[in-house]
Amino acid sequence: MKISSFAKAFVAALAAGAGVAATAVQDSVFTTGEVVTTVLAILGALGITYAVPNRQPDSVTPGRGL
């Protein structure tokens, strides 16, 4: 199964943003600092995950694991 770098980065950003946002709204208030932290988590996940290439399959025998 081939996953594009953009799709991989999008899922990572969604997970990072959701995790930070869920933690930030525990007190029912979303402050400016929490918004900045959420945006930075999303951008960081997008950038880092997009920059890291997908692992290319090497000579792994099917069914034998990595």
Image (cartoon, rainbow, N blue to C red):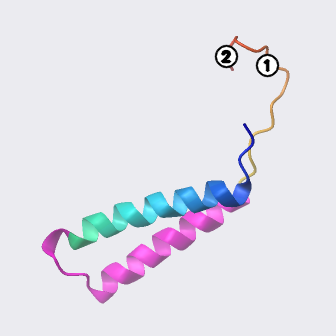
Residue 19 in the image: x percent, y percent? Answer: 36, 60
| Picture quadrant of residue 51 | bottom right
The picture places residue 30, in percent across and down from the top left corner, at: 25, 81
Closer to the chain start, of discs 2 and 1, is 1
Side of 49 where 61 appears, left or right:
right
CA separation, marks 2 and 1?
Answer: 7 Å
Magenta-drawn segment: 26-51
The residue where tag 1 is placed is 60
Looking at numbered disc 2 in the image, what kind of residue is underneath it? Gly
Total numbered labels placed on residues in the image = 2
Q: Looking at the magenta stretch, what is its main secondary structure?
A: helix
Q: Is residue 56 left or right of residue 51?
A: right
Q: Is residue 14 above or below residue 8?
A: below
| Circles 2 and 1 in contact, beta carbons < 8 Å | yes
Residue occupying image coordinates x 32% and y 84%: 33
Disc 1 residue crowd, few under 14, some 14–19, many 20+, Cα 10 Å: few
Q: Residue at x 26, y 65 (%)?
A: 23
Q: Is residue 58 above or below residue 37?
A: above
Residue 12 at x, y percent in the picture:
54, 57
Crowding at mark 2 (Cα within 10 Å: few <14, some 14-19, many 20+): few
Q: Left or right: where does residue 29 sit relative to residue 43?
A: left
* Res. 65 mark: 2
Examine the rendered structure and indicate whether residue 65 appears above or below residue 15: above
Specify the quadrant that holds the C terminus. top right
